[in-house]
């Protein structure tokens, strides 16, 4: 009889992956309100390597660790206040990124499919985070969609394009070494 739960190897991959996301969040360059970090690259890589279940769960655990105060977010920040703040929507959006990339990764190892899934996953993260930013930020100041996009999305597109290329290349090269 086969068990449907998590194996020890799954738990090890998930825990290590949450730690990798945290370390990658600490590598940052401040660009206005939102820093450029390696979080999105780590999430795309992890979901690409480990698939939907392990990738999305690792991302969720990373966010929960941050929510309870462990300083895993960029700038060594933690706490529910970070998530409820103006940029918290982008953090929550990481779950969508991991889910989209992981679902595609579970179906194929083709680089073009992984790249498309990473682009789509990050676009969904951008959309969720942008709406969140407008809702939270507009409580204090009125901000337009175009202003929000110029602050929170457009400056990050070139960086995320490079991170997608790196994550997809690493995924294709490393996935064959991952134990199922």
Image (cartoon, helix red, strand yellow):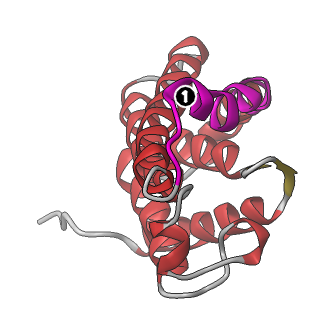
Tell me the residue at 44%/56% (across/down).
136
Q: In this rendering, would 153 be left or right of 76?
A: left
**Left or right of 21: which side holds 69?**
left
Relative image position of residue 36 (x, y in whole percent): 78, 46
**Is residue 146 magenta-colored?**
yes
Residue at the image point whose x is 46% and y is 50% from the top = 138
Quadrant of the rendered image containing residue 17: bottom right
Residue 9 visible in rendering: no
Q: Disc count in the image?
A: 1
Specify whether 119 is left or right of 105: right
Magenta part of the chain: 141-164
Residue at point 55%, 28% (across, down): 118
Query: Residue drawn 11% across and 66% down?
Result: 1
Badge 1 is on which residue? Answer: 118
Residue 123 seen by the camera: yes
Identify which residue, 162 or 19, lies in the foreground: 162
Give x and y (percent) for residue 65.
Answer: 51, 80
Does 68 appear above or below 86?
below
Q: Which residue sits furthest top?
A: 112
Magenta highlight on residue 89: no
């Amino acid at each position: 009889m086969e068990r449907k739960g998590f194996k020890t190897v799954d738990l090890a991959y998930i825990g290590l992956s949450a730690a990798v996301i945290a370390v990658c969040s600490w590598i940052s360059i401040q660009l206005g309100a939102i820093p450029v970090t390696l979080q999105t690259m780590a999430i795309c890589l992890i979901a690409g390597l480990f698939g939907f279940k392990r990738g999305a769960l690792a991302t969720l655990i990373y966010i929960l660790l941050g929510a309870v105060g462990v300083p895993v977010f960029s700038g060594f920040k933690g706490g529910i206040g970070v998530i409820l703040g103006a940029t918290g929507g982008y953090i929550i959006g990481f779950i969508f990124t991991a889910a989209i990339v992981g679902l595609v990764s579970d179906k194929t190892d083709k680089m073009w499919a992984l790249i498309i899934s990473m682009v789509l996953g990050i676009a969904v993260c951008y959309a969720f985070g942008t709406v969140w930013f407008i809702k939270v930020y507009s409580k204090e100041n009125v901000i337009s969609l175009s202003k929000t996009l110029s602050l929170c999305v457009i400056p990050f597109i070139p960086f995320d394009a490079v991170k997608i290329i790196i994550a997809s290349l690493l995924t294709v090269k490393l996935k064959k070494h991952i134990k199922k």
